[in-house]
Image: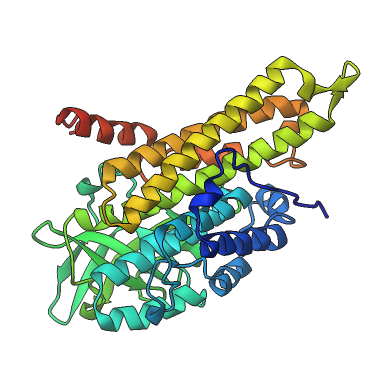
Amino acid sequence: MKQDAFDHPDFYALDDLLTEEHKLIRSSIRDFVKREISPYIEDWAQRAHFPYEIVKKFGDIGAFGPTIPTEYGGGGLDYISYGLIMQEIERGDSGMRSTASVQGSLVMYPIYKFGNEAQRKKYLPKLASGEWLGCFGLTEPDHGSNPGGMVTNFKDMGDHYLLNGAKMWISNSPKADIAVVWAKNEQGRIHGLVVERGMPGFSTPETHGKWSLRASTTGELVFDNVKVPKENLLPNKNGLGAPLMCLDSARYGIAWGAIGAAMDCYDSARRYAMERIQFGKPIASFQLVQKKLAEMLTEITKAQLLNWRLGVLMNEGKATTPQISMAKRNSVQMALEIAREARQIHGGMGITGEYPIMRHMMNLESVVTYEGTHDIHLLILGNTITGIPAFV
């Protein structure tokens, strides 16, 4: 079994900015990834296999809802802790991080923020422990970057709601026990509803043939006259701003997670360059290889600093959507470029499952467009800079 000897780069001594608790959390998640994910991930990805047993294991180590208060089963941790957890899991695999971040940011977060006390007590502890898996239904077949155009809807039938419509590209859906679904009421106002597996008319077809996030399970949500109990409506916020708040939380986690993927590619490239002999010496001795490695380390360091500052702002309740967009966009673009440069350093070996490079590269092709495409995040920043929205 291949040994995972990863050690993270910290060129600007950012560890000095972390608390002992931050470092302990990072260490425990890193050990978990080395033990439970790294030895198996290449096989899972090659077989397009989602290891459902990982859900309970994530629950056991506190990867689900780390910022949710402990009274509901969460970790009660700060946002830098959350970021470090996502970084370490995505260093193992983006699909594994997707499983965890959807559960925490897109399922537990809206139930905690927008739900009532009865909903929190019913759902959150089981989601936190990994007893239940959840998913988030916003994207539709014809409405991705324009979620406000959704057609999924529900009608008030007196003693229940009647839900109709469909969602697609939904992480976790084929195995999910519950779905937080966003739909329009009869007045066209967007609300969140908790839909439970087993409700008649609710199905979750799996999406096959993916070249990316192959160890993650993805599917659709189909609602055919689903009767949803009225107590399953999230009462404390409605309108498009509600799901967008969830996306801010998820995008923050992605900003950290993508650094993990970049770190893994850099670490693999550095080790390979030191060991690979050509023309009688290690390829690490050649200027162009050193240039690639130096630029990788520079970009990782810049992203680390950006994310740490964003984490401080998140902890203070001051982070804005455009700030989160900048970090998500920067981290994923940086990670994609590092994966491609690392692939070149590995030469032909870079396309094989013996090294993680190609798997990270394919995964990041999903990460660059989900939770807001690369260009949409650019336009969010452009709107902030100019005051002129270019995407409507």
Quadrant that contains the C terminus: top left
Residue 212 found in image quarter: top right
Total label count? 0
Position of 274 relative to 146 (above/below): above
Residue drawn where x is 40% and y is 36% of the image = 329
Residue 168 at x, y = what percent?
39, 51
Viewer can see residue 309: yes
Viewer can see residue 211: no
Asked if residue 11 lies left or right of residue 320, the reply is: right
Asked if residue 218 lies left or right of residue 231, the reply is: right
Residue 12 at x, y = what percent?
55, 39
Residue drawn where x is 74% and y is 40% of the image = 355
Quadrant that contains the N terminus: bottom right
Query: Could you say which is closer to the camera, residue 18 or residue 331?
Result: 18
Residue 270 at x, y = what percent?
72, 33
Residue 127 found in image quarter: bottom left
Q: How is the image coloured?
A: rainbow
Asked if residue 244 lies left or right of residue 71, the reply is: left
Asked if residue 383 lies left or right of residue 247, the reply is: left
Residue 257 at x, y = what percent?
51, 48
Q: Residue furthest right?
A: 280
Position of 78 relative to 151 (above/below): below
Residue 295 found in image quarter: top right
